[in-house]
Amino acid sequence: MDFDMLGLAPRLIAKLAEQGITDPTPIQKKAIPHAMNGRDVMGLAQTGTGKTAAFGLPLIHTLMQVGEKPEPKTARGLILAPTRELAKQILDNLRAYSDGTHLKIGLVVGGASINAQINRLQKGTDLLVATPGRLIDLLDRKAVRLDRTEFLVLDEADQMLDLGFIHALRRIAPLLSKDRQTMLFSATMPKQMAELSTAYLNDPVRVEAAPPGKPAEKITQGIHFVTKSDKSVLLIDHLDAHRDEQALVFTRTKHGAERLMKTLDKAGFAAGSIHGNKSQGQRERALKAFRNGDLTVLVATDVAARGLDIPGIRHVYNYDLPNVPDNYVHRIGRTARAGRDGSAVAYCAPDEMSELRAIEKTMGRKIPVLGGTPWAAEQAKPTPNRQKPKSRPSQKRRRPRRNRAARAA
């Protein structure tokens, strides 16, 4: 099967061919025909298998047939993503697919000028890519309307339906056209998330290109059991073995990412970092430098775990194991993209054994041991949390905040 057989417009197929995209991936073969027929779709596929095109191509095809311009401050289609980095990457892909057409594709994310975004939304948008927090800000300012929005896509749907964003989504969804097409795409879909998704889908078709939670076959995985104090020494040894190849290193905290980046910089590596304490401009510059090869090591929190598509990434290191097991699958999916090979190495300290067991349970397989031995139960006991001193209640009445994840986006 090729793109011609999927029923896409010849102009769109020609644009794909210019980019060297001639054969649809399994998830594209399964999802695009249903999307073209107007069905609600729940798509599950491994990272790096072309999910953006699976929903983007049928949307562009459909909107290309519309002859009139969108009304002021409206968006015909809305794509929600959990992070700024993923939203920007979706935008870049959609613009590449639709290059030369009349379609206007916009982006609204936090960390950028909201006034500039308000101005761009004035004339209406065919497809709007957004993070939930900034979209709500714009809705509150009446800078955008969603009553004409007939297409909704949730990318990384498991995270969009999680506690981090579900409250924002519950606010946004009722504002959309009731007669709409909804598509959800993700590499993982926990049972409770799948159940929750029924509130947003109407008689959906479920398509799978691989079992949910299963990483790409071409990723060589391994784990080292190592104390926290020895992790940086081991990481430097590993990075030193392939100084000319790009590596992505994941930490659990923002401060940890920054400290580790400085350690690697002192060790002579061209290292950068992205995390929530960085401005949007700093994050974009670091990603551009990494993409261009000016940086060979990028240290990141989970803001880079989803959607980051840089073909040159050969190695992923889990310096800290994630406390959400599905995030491990997303993290290591940053390598071995589009059929390439890649390696994923994890470091496990004594107090991370429970995280390791949860990750292996999610994947349904053991991670091969490359060094050390699994920590014994008495070694793996977490350090008791110190009680924080009680703070005095503030006299000021504070306005309630949105959830941290939605606010950061």
Image (tube, helix red, strand yellow):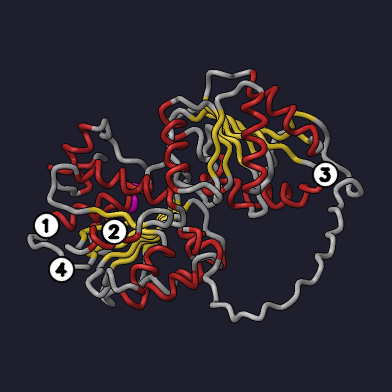
Q: Are marks 4 and 1 in contact (CB under 8 Å)?
A: no
Please report whichever mark, 2 or 4, sits nearer to the chain's N-terminal start: 4
Q: Amino acid at mark 1?
A: Gln
Residue behind mark 3: 350
Residue 299 lies in quadrant: top right
Query: Which residue is depicted at the point 69% across and 38% down?
Result: 367
Residue 52 image offset from top left, x and y in percent: 35, 48
View extreme (front): residue: 395
The reply to whether callout 2 and callout 4 are in contact (CB within 8 Å) is no
Using residue 103 as the reference point, say whether residue 50 is left or right of it.
Answer: right
Label whose residue precedes the other's in the sequence (2 or 3): 2
Mark before the other along the chain sequence, 4 or 1: 1
Label 3 secondary element = helix
Identify which amino acid the numbered label 2 is placed on: Leu
Q: In this orientation, which residue lies closer to the viewer: 115 or 245?
A: 115
Classify 262 as above or below 127.
above
* Residue 303 in the image, given as x and y percentages of width and height: 52, 49
The residue under label 2 is 128
Q: Nearer the viewer, residue 318 or 27?
A: 318
Tell me the CA gap for discs 1 and 2: 18 Å
Residue at mark 2 to residue at mark 4: CA–CA distance = 13 Å
- Which stretch is magenta? 27-31
Residue underneath mark 1: 65
Q: Mark 4 highlights which residue?
A: 71
> From where the camera sits, is residue 41 visible?
no
Q: Earlier in the sequence, mark 3 or mark 4?
A: 4
Q: Secondary structure at mark 1?
A: loop
Q: Is residue 29 magenta?
A: yes
Residue 118 picture location, percent across and down: 28, 62
| Residue 309 as seen in the image, left or right of residue 301 | left
